[in-house]
Image (cartoon, rainbow, N blue to C red):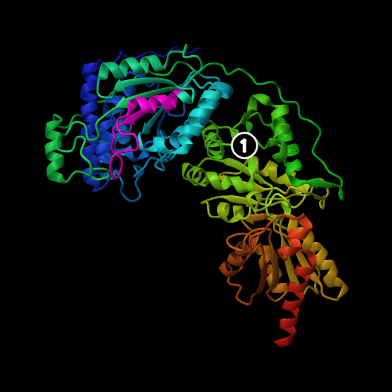
């Protein structure tokens, strides 16, 4: 074991100088940039000065060190404070702080992102940093089994976000005593007083009701802050997360703006900045680093994985793709100890429960808290795990901002939505994911998959494990015949052509459940002498543009797309966008989709009502062929 020398503890007198430096640098950088949030930074400067100088166990030269504490600014708009901390730690230069903040092409962005190696997750959309921190804390306690702490700075405005309370709830449920929340209660939000103002007792009652240990302090009393941060790291906290409610003053340190409304998100004009810096004692150039982390502990090994039998299905057997996902996830978990799973209390429907039974130490139940589920997946990904998170496709809409921010964070997370489309039948529209493909396609760098059968689902689940960014797979509720033999390959960005000839007159494109209707429609058309090409567009983003282009050329632009989804942004949009981008202009496309509000019924009734059964697809194809004949 390597012994790391611990630097002498920084005195509180020096911490006071550091706090003044942080305030000055927050003012200087935002005034130089012409934008930013200096007053929101100034209120938390004392807390951060004590933390980074005396409590944050961090090797600034090795930010990926496995024993490092984690510092997350859930209050991401206080980026001037965070970047001032980085300057004080000696990892950001004066030049970069003064001329790189909020500038084009520079890494000190308006809100923090992991383009900086000391930032774990992107924040700035309020209510996200703490839920992400729960995911990091889960990794620390249950997977890494390291003694690092997760320090999260929250603003008081974001304590109105429901996601914050989902986070507190799950932190208490999982006994995350390694999670410490520092709430900067400065009373003023963007447009005036926050919901609770300085009602510290109300905040305390809420946090305690969610199972947290609560400490209340004057957020500008350095000794009180030091005492609270020390208490927060007490391992005898009864397995509870700690919330330190810090009563602070917005704009603290400059009398002209202290506790005054109207200064949120506004840099100080140059003349005011000059007076503020003078009042704070002028610029300083301290370099302060706190304690180093302890040597990384030997991680306790998980139960050895035992690869089970390969996941195989007989062609023709009826298997729901959601069941195939569960089977594939168990097999994948046996091969890769970094694979973890989460679910939103529907695991017996998504079949994530199979993974939970096989690997309970790598499964995290998030209950009905989809925002926290995605955030926990993000935090687990930060620690190098490969999370798969599942729920009904419709319920991912609740977590969309977390998915969007996950893309900005650059994490690789895998999301699986079951019970999609009108195919689910009698449950009705509240349960039908009809927007999910569009939603996920719009996420930067995302991958969107929609397998039709069990064999392709297994192959794509395996492919997801190594795929970067946000990957979404849509699964189907009902059981449908296996189309592909074992060993068939399904690369991301590919497709399958199931019917093809040199006499094809129309192309039918489906994905998931509509592929079967396309196959049946092709048989109906064949009876009438119309040869149809059938494409399984299992990869919706990226889509197989080459196969689409070849089909459009072969069938003279006559294409029918059938999707169990609203018309906007789904498979039909993906096909059209691809062909137009490739310069294919002679197009005659019929897009069949769910265009009205569905109700309850059987799968067959609802698919026919939406025009997604074989008869409707064949009719649309015949119209395209007939129109072509009439135009000759």
Query: In the visual, does 110 lie left or right of 507?
Result: left
Q: Is residue 203 magenta?
A: yes
Tell me if residue 312 can be seen: yes
Question: In which quarter of the view is residue 79 placed?
Answer: top left
Q: Where is residue 581 shown, x and y percent of the image?
A: 56, 67
Point out residue 504 in the picture as x, y percentages from the top left corner.
78, 73
The image shows residue 132 at horizontal and vertical percentages of 48, 34
Query: Where residue 325 appears, x then y in whole percent?
Result: 72, 41
Q: Is residue 182 magenta?
A: yes
Residue at the spot x=31%, y=46% of the render? 102
> Is there any visible trace of residue 68 in the rendered image?
no
Using residue 2 as the reference point, say whether residue 618 is left or right of it.
right
| Residue under the point 53% across and 44% down | 399
Foreground residue, 217 or 332?
217
- Kindly indicate the quadrant of the structure image that contains residue 16: top left
Q: Which residue in the protein does label 1 denote?
A: 344
| SS of the residue under disc 1 | loop
Q: What quarter of the picture does the C terminus occupy?
A: bottom right
Chain part drawn in magenta: 181-208
């Amino acid at each position: 074991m390597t012994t790391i020398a611990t630097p002498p503890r920084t005195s509180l007198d020096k911490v006071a100088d550091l706090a003044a430096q942080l305030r000055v640098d927050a003012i200087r950088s935002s005034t130089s940039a012409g934008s930013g949030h200096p007053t929101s930074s100034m209120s938390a400067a004392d807390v951060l000065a004590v933390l980074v100088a005396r409590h944050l166990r961090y090797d600034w030269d090795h930010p990926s060190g496995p024993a490092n504490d984690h510092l997350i600014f859930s209050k991401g708009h206080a980026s001037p404070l965070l970047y001032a901390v980085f300057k004080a730690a000696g990892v950001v230069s004066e030049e970069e702080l003064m001329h790189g903040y909020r500038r084009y092409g520079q890494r000190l962005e308006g809100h923090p992102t992991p383009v900086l190696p000391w930032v774990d997750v992107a924040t700035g959309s309020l209510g996200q940093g703490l839920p992400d921190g729960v995911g990091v804390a889960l990794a620390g306690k249950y997977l890494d089994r390291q003694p690092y702490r997760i320090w999260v700075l929250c603003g008081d405005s974001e304590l109105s976000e429901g996601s914050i309370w989902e986070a507190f709830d799950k932190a208490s449920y999982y006994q995350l005593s390694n999670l410490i929340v520092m709430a900067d209660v400065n009373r003023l939000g963007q447009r005036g007083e926050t919901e609770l103002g300085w009602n510290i007792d109300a905040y305390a009652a809420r946090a305690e009701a969610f199972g947290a240990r609560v400490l209340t302090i004057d957020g500008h009393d350095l000794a009180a802050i030091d005492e609270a941060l020390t208490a927060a790291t007490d391992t005898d906290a009864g397995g509870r997360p700690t919330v330190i409610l810090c009563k602070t003053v917005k704009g603290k340190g400059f009398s002209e703006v202290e506790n005054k409304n109207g200064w949120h998100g506004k840099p100080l004009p140059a003349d005011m900045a000059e007076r503020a810096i003078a009042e704070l004692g002028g610029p300083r150039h301290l370099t302060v680093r706190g304690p180093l982390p302890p040597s990384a502990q030997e991680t306790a090994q998980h139960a050895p994985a035992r690869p089970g039998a390969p996941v195989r299905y007989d062609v023709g057997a009826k298997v729901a793709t959601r069941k195939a996902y569960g089977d594939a996830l168990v097999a994948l978990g046996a091969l890769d100890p970094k694979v973890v799973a989460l679910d939103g209390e529907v695991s017996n429907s998504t079949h994530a429960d199979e993974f939970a039974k096989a690997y309970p130490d790598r499964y995290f139940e998030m209950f009905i808290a989809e925002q926290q589920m995605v955030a926990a997946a993000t935090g687990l990904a930060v620690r190098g795990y490969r999370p798969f998170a599942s729920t009904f496709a419709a319920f991912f809409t609740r977590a969309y901002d977390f998915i969007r921010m996950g893309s900005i964070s650059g994490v690789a997370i895998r999301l699986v939505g079951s019970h999609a489309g009108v195919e689910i039948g009698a449950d009705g529209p509240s349960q039908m994911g009809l927007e999910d493909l569009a939603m996920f396609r719009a996420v930067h760098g995302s991958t969107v998959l929609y397998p039709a059968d069990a064999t392709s689902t297994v192959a794509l689940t395996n492919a997801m494990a190594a795929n970067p960014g946000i990957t979404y797979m849509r699964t189907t509720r009902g059981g449908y015949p296996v189309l592909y033999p074992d060993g068939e390959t399904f690369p991301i960005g590919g497709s399958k052509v199931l019917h093809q000839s040199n006499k094809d007159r129309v192309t039918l494109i489906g994905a998931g459940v509509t592929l079967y209707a396309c196959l049946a429609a092709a048989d109906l058309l064949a009876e009438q002498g119309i040869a149809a090409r059938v494409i399984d567009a299992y990869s919706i983003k990226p889509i197989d543009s080459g196969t689409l282009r070849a089909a459009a050329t072969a069938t003279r632009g006559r294409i029918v797309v059938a999707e169990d989804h609203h018309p906007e942004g789904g498979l039909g949009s993906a096909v059209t966008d691809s062909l137009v981008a490739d310069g294919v202009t002679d197009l005659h496309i019929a897009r069949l989709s769910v265009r009205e509000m569905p109700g309850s019924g059987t799968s067959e009734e609802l698919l026919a009502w939406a025009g997604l059964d074989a008869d409707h697809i064949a009719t649309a194809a015949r119209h395209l062929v007939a129109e072509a004949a009439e135009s000759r």
